[in-house]
Image (tube, rainbow, N blue to C red):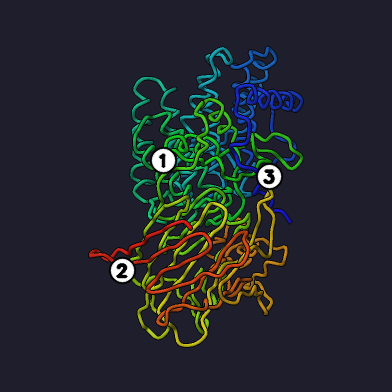
Amino acid sequence: MHLPRQLGPLHDLPATPEAYDAVLADVVAQALARLTPEGNLEHPDADDDIGDTSLGVTSLLALAWQRSKDPRLPGAVRRSLAFHLRERVYTEDNPGYPNLTVRGSGLPYARYVLEAGAHPIGDWPSTVWALLQAVNILGLADGLVDDEQRAELVEVSHGYWRWLTEATFFNPQEAGNQAIGCVVGGLMLARHLPPGQEEPVRARALALYRDRIRAHRVLGRGALLPPEHGGAYDNNYGPISLSFLAQAHRISGAEMFAEDGDALARYLDARLTSGGFDNGGPRYSEQHSGFESVLGLRYFGARIGSDLGRYRGDTNWGRHAVKPDGGVDGHFAWMLVWQIQDTTPWHRKPSVGPARHQLRADSVSVAFDSRMTPSLVEAGGTYYLPAAVNRQHGFGPVLDGFLYCRPMGEVRVRDVRAGGLSAKLVSKPVVGRDHVLRHVRSLYVTDGTRLWVTVAVERLDGTPYLLAGLPYAADDGDRVRRVAEGEVASAGALRLTHPAAQGTDCFDARAELTQEQAAFALAADPRGYGDPDEGWRHLVTSTAYEAEPAPGAPENLHVFAVRYGPGGDFTPSFEGDLTVRTEAFTAVIGAEDAHGEPALALAAR
């Protein structure tokens, strides 16, 4: 079973002018065949996310004309623009819309569903999207539309902005991507307004970002991030927010957009595996965006010097939004316009220098959560998630059903590189059920092909084991597929266990169920509205690799040693407090210095 949207790295999509012209030529062919006598360019099967879609295709036709001067396009642009202005601009309040602050304003807005009162909750983002489509057309209108039609579009666009910022609550869905998109719409609109109207709109857009978005960022893995549907980051919408920040910086030049985009990009770089796989988010776990991510990944990847384009996106949406039959849908068309207009090249090399929340070398990577516990491990082409035991999730020692990985105090981190090896030492104080403070030291070493993990803790009474990960997926090159085991070796006895019980709160890697499906099944709200991250935290038990303590450890320590990836016999040795010797390296974990920082020496063998 393959994960439906974990497809190819986004930087593999051709980005030459010729490639983009071919994309636009296909859009033109579909649009001219679809255009109705009334000027409608909506896909015949469209029923939701519809208020901006015809206008989005119109914007792509306008861009195609600017690049090709195809004589068939001016008439199609004018007819389709007239259709939107006549049929898709609503000024009467949508019955049941809960987020109005001014009733009967008469200001224009776009509907998520055309039928009055059918599903009004989506009208705010639909109006943001319609504003973005409109301002793109205004930027491409020269030689295409007459003064009267252009003036009407300016008036409607200004009305969209006023409805979004005066007649409703701002960002009612608490969705960072929608909110930043609204700001971008205002910044772009300002450039097309008459003198005297421009500056108030620009100032309002900047103030909304500064006071209503930036001031309310949330902390995730050491970074301040625009909140997304109640969480810090979402795999689908987070990269879209990054694209909005890129466009905001391109349009305004305001440094705060660059600073916040850099922070979000570095966060994404740290959580993303070498192979581009990632999962998790408060709205979707694995439904990755496609072309909507490209602008931000490319723009900020170049700024921070990172290969963010390794991000695996939904390449079914690699160029523009499509319906199940592959037909073009104008939703998100504004992002394709910006992507084509921006000429930033992909940065294709990994970022240099260590990152606190990541260890990465070639095809091996470990992403760490805010507690410096692995959130995702990649080695030997397999991706491992934190396993679950007794409703506790993570990587770490387990004794009597208690997982020692939640820190009780500051977590210390030390990064070292030597002889082609990269290592990270994580030292954290933990407290068990007996309330005794212990120190767990976890050493991660990689040569770019294999990953060695050594975990040491003061000797525990009983029979502890190391919870060493849930094998979840594997890289097939252009796709990611589900797996139930990986290449793992242990110095102590190793077992791969599966939940003995059945139920939604047990995740068996041998089943076809995806992590996202399981997470939504455990969430409090229906799929698409619930928080899969919150649901996944309700997981009681899962498939897990469990490693027993390594023989030959110092008398006062329990030491666990595991290797992920290919290799022969694995027989590490240990001495003192603590020297680790494997077939590839010798590592010495030294005493803490005067500031309490742990020492680490590493040498290749």
Nearest to the observer: residue 493 or residue 475: 493
Question: Residue 151 appears at what percent x and percent y?
Answer: 50, 20
Marks 2/3 in contact by CB < 8 Å: the verdict is: no
Say if 102 sits above or below 455 in the image: above
Mark 2, Cα crowd under 10 Å, few <14 / some 14-19 / many 20+, is few
Mark 1 vs 3, N-terminal side: 1
Residue highlighted by disc 2 = 591
Mark 1 vs 2, N-terminal side: 1
Q: Residue furthest left?
A: 594
Say if 373 sits above or below 31 in the image: below
Horizontal side, residue 356 vs residue 277: left or right: left
Residue highlighted by disc 3 = 478
Label 3 sits on a secondary structure element that is loop
Horizontal side, residue 60 vs residue 437: left or right: right
Residue highlighted by disc 1 = 166
Question: Residue 269 appears at what percent x and percent y?
Answer: 48, 47
Q: Which amino acid does the dot numbered 2 rest on?
A: Ala
In which quadrant is the N terminus drawn? bottom right
Residue 220 visible from this viewpoint: no
Q: Residue at the spot x=51%, y=81% of the render?
A: 464
Nearest to the observer: residue 491 or residue 330: 491
* Nearer mark to the viewer, of 1 and 3: 3
Say if 308 sits above or below 501 in the image: above
Residue 505 sits in which quadrant? bottom right
Question: Residue 367 appears at what percent x and percent y?
Answer: 49, 56
